Amino acid sequence: MLLGETVTSQRCTALKSKIMRQSYIMPGFRPTLGFTLLYLGLVVLIPLSTLVFKSLTLSWDDYVHIITSKRVLASFRVSFVTSLLGAAVASVFGFIIAWTFVRYNFIGKRILDALIDLPFALPTAVAGIVLATIYQPSGYIGRLLMQTLGVKVAYNPTGIVIALIFISLPFVVRTVQPVLQEFDTKMEEAASTLGANKLQIFIKIIFPNVFPALLTGFALAFARGVGEYGSVIFIAGNIPYVSEIVPLMIITKLEQYEYAGATAIALTLLIISFILLLVINLLQHWIRKQSGQL
């Protein structure tokens, strides 16, 4: 009798869990999943697979020779270091800007909020020309920095970082801003009544809840910076071993009709970027799990 009740209870539990799993599946799951896979195949996987197939025309020794050449390695160092620095700085200032827009009301707020999206609409080549014009040694800001601080911005990695901050800042702001808007301020009030000061409230309550979104903004900014071309080449100066970026190396190879070499560099850039983004996403998932958001 007890065995029969146990079996019946297990069957009921299994049926209940199955019903609950099915309730989470929205109608039209199969066609939408098929469309998603079709999109990923046609737009993402098939074009990217050409990099692999074209790179297979090279022998392993030729591939290693192309990737490990001093000029290519220097361009990888410039691209990834400047992208990480640009994404880090954009994350800090993007968080401050998003916090200002959400927590404070002031004159001109709507106008400034709209200006944040301007780099999305501005052609990257135009942004690069403008930045190079004002930051070059004879430009307004460039001349001021040279005379006061002795800092040369244009035609070195510093200029690349500034260009990447300019084009990646909106990614951070638009990622963090909705999270701050949906944040429950009652938690801050509860912590304040328990004796926590403003710094403790920010460190212990606000920042842990916002950090996953901030990390997402950092990943988007980094991904945009690694592949950025138009806004960088004008201010970078494209000096070999100093300010030459990987996208420019790929374009140079293509102009020289070295298609296999260009695809080898592009494939390496894709693999390294994918690994770094995967690590960031896993870290974000772990943080969400630790904070109880999953």
Image (cartoon, rainbow, N blue to C red):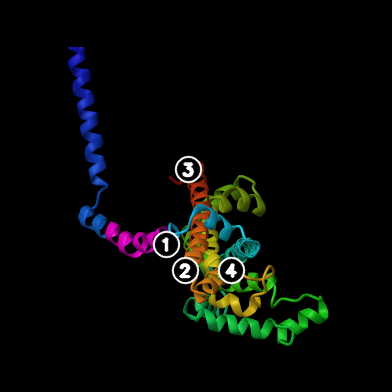
Of 104 and 156, which appears nearest the observer? 156
On the question of residue 114 being in view, the answer is no
Q: What is the x, y in percent for residue 45?
A: 36, 59
Q: Are marks 3 and 4 in contact (CB under 8 Å)?
A: no
Task: Point out the frontmost of discs 2 and 4.
Answer: 2
Which residues are drawn in magenta? 36-53
Task: Point out the frontmost of discs 1 and 4.
Answer: 1
Is 84 covered by the magenta stretch? no
Q: For marks 3 and 4, give the CA distance.
A: 27 Å
Is 49 covered by the magenta stretch? yes
Circle 2 SS class: helix
Which amino acid, mark 3? Lys
Q: Pointer 4: residues within 10 angstroms few (<14), some, or many (20+)?
A: many
Task: Point out the frontmost of discs 1 and 3.
Answer: 1
Q: Earlier in the sequence, mark 1 or mark 2?
A: 1
Identity of the residue drawn at 52% across and 67% down:
227
Q: For marks 3 and 2, give the CA distance.
A: 44 Å
Q: Are marks 1 and 2 in contact (CB under 8 Å)?
A: yes
Residue for badge 2: 259
Task: Say the numbered circle drawn on residue 97.
Answer: 4
Task: Point out the frontmost of discs 3 and 4.
Answer: 3
Task: Say the numbered circle drawn on residue 289.
Answer: 3
Which amino acid, mark 1? Lys
Residue for badge 1: 54
